[in-house]
Image (cartoon, rainbow, N blue to C red):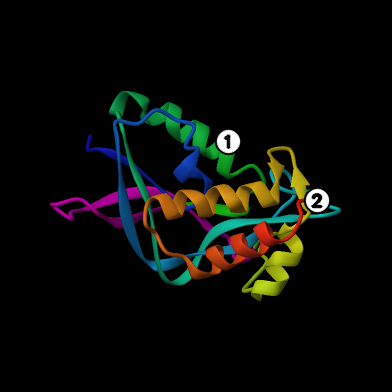
Amino acid sequence: MSDFWVFGYGSLMWRPGFPFEEAFPAHLEGERRAFCVQSYIYRGTREHPGLVLGLDRGGSCRGMAFRVAEAERDAVLAYLRERELVTNSYLEVERDIRLERPARDYVRATTYVVDRDHPQYAGDLSRAAVLAQVSDSVGQAGSNRDYVLATAEHLASLNIEDADLEWLAEQLLAAPAA
């Protein structure tokens, strides 16, 4: 079998939670990082949902590609399915991504895109709507605010620009934590 790759664009970038052999910044065309998934478990509740990132149609996304050893493939897939498909608001797909390393080669990677037909799909929200929803939402994995700030910090450490995420992090840092 060939190498098994996973593409992360949100919390998988800074907290993959699975063993990998190597990781590289990578680029995905045709989908973009967006706060488009209402979180009822990890970063909010049904009564007060948070918002988490999803890959939504259009644009492109820089993230991280993780190469997983063949011996770990099944265990990593089981872990990812338990983590990412907890409410089935994402679809597990394979996409071609370009690794940002000297060879700049393309690999096929497993990733998770938003299911636009799922009730947790929030659509294309304004910056103000996203800020209002994430500012004080809390779920089993912690505050939505912390999720946003950790993701923004990690993207900055990799020199990955995301204007909406950077604006959101600035607004959250300027306001007192709830």
- Given the image, on which type of amino acid does mark 2 rest? Ala
Which residue is situated farthest in the right direction here? 47
Nearer to us of marks 2 and 1 is 2
Residue at screen point 66% across, 76% down: 126
Say whether marks 2 and 1 touch (CB < 8 Å). no
Identify the disc placed on residue 82.
Answer: 1
Where residue 73 appears, as percent x and y from the top left, is: 37, 30
Where residue 21 appears, as percent x and y from the top left, is: 29, 30
On screen, residue 121 above or below 126: above
- Looking at the rendering, the stretch of residues picked out in magenta corresponds to 94-117
Q: Quadrant of the N terminus?
A: top left
Is 103 or 31 nearer to us in this picture?
103
Identify the disc placed on residue 3.
Answer: none
Identify the disc placed on residue 178.
Answer: 2
The CA span between labels 2 and 1 is 30 Å
Is 45 or 112 nearer to us in this picture?
45
Residue 91 shown in magenta: no
Horizontal relation, residue 124 to residue 23: left or right = right
Horizontal relation, residue 132 to residue 121: left or right = right
Which secondary structure is most common in the magenta stretch? strand
Snapshot quadrant of residue 127: bottom right
